[in-house]
Amino acid sequence: MTNNPKYRNDDLVAVVWPRQSELLVRHDAKTWEAVAQGEWAMDPKKADRVRVLVAVFDDVVVGAWSVRGATHTARVPDGKSRTVSRSTFDTVPDARLGYLVGGPPPLARRRNPQSTFELRDLPGADVIVGETELADHGLLRLGQFTFTVSEDGHAELQVPPGSILTVRIAA
């Protein structure tokens, strides 16, 4: 099943730092996606605007997913006197967000383990906003770099002399 939702510039991106769940992921008890869906302290109206969820660990994006919706709970935590609203995200894979995985986080670490911003401010968002279908072949030119993918799936990258190319392989 493919998931190609339409994104808008004013949709929200939630960036989460689920560092306390690292051992669960490392021991295969949970996935990064499962811990990123979390129960995050967030206003329900804001959570309902989130369309992209990005998980960061050790200053590297470990996952990015499309958000289909959120469920909310409100309760007074033990030993506290005020109600806290928590939101859990319903996510699905979206291959168009794969470019984020393995790269630097779109936001610097904050005091809170989650933060939101508008999709228009996500590096590379212009490629996914309003897009409904990924091309399976074509040519991309960035400066003097040229990347070509043929209809049979053969890919070629032309790099200018003296340039440095770093390749990151997605896990």
Image (cartoon, rainbow, N blue to C red):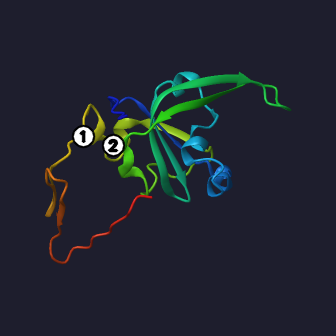
Quick check: marks 2 and 1 in contact, CB under 8 Å? Answer: yes
Q: Which residue is mark 1?
A: 134
Whether 75 is drawn above or below 102: the answer is above
Q: Which residue is mark 2?
A: 96
Whether 136 is drawn above or below 133: the answer is below
**Of all residues shown, which one is farthest toward the right?**
79
SS for dot 2:
helix
The Cα atoms of the two marked residues, 2 and 1, are separated by 8 Å
* Quadrant occupied by the N terminus: top left
Image check: 73 left or right of 121? right
Residue 135 image-quadrant placement: top left
- Between 108 and 163, the residue placed more toward the observer is 163
- Between 69 and 135, the residue placed more toward the observer is 135
Image check: 129 left or right of 73? left
Total numbered circles: 2
Q: Which mark is residue 168?
A: none
Where residue 139 sits: x, y (%)?
A: 13, 52
Residue drawn at x 64%, y 54% as measured from the top left: 22
Q: Specify the amino acid type for callout 1.
A: Leu
SS for dot 1:
loop
Residue 44 image-quadrant placement: top right
Where residue 125 sits: x, y (%)?
A: 32, 41
Which label's residue is closer to the chain start, 2 or 1? 2
Q: How packed is label 1: few (under 14 Cα within 10 Å), some, or many (20 or more)?
A: few
Where residue 123 sits: x, y (%)?
A: 34, 47
Residue drawn at x 39%, y 50% as measured from the top left: 100
Q: How packed is label 2: few (under 14 Cα within 10 Å), some, or many (20 or more)?
A: some
Q: Specify the amino acid type for callout 2.
A: Arg
Whether 6 is drawn above or below 136: the answer is above
Where residue 105 sits: x, y (%)?
A: 46, 52
Image check: 23 left or right of 77? left
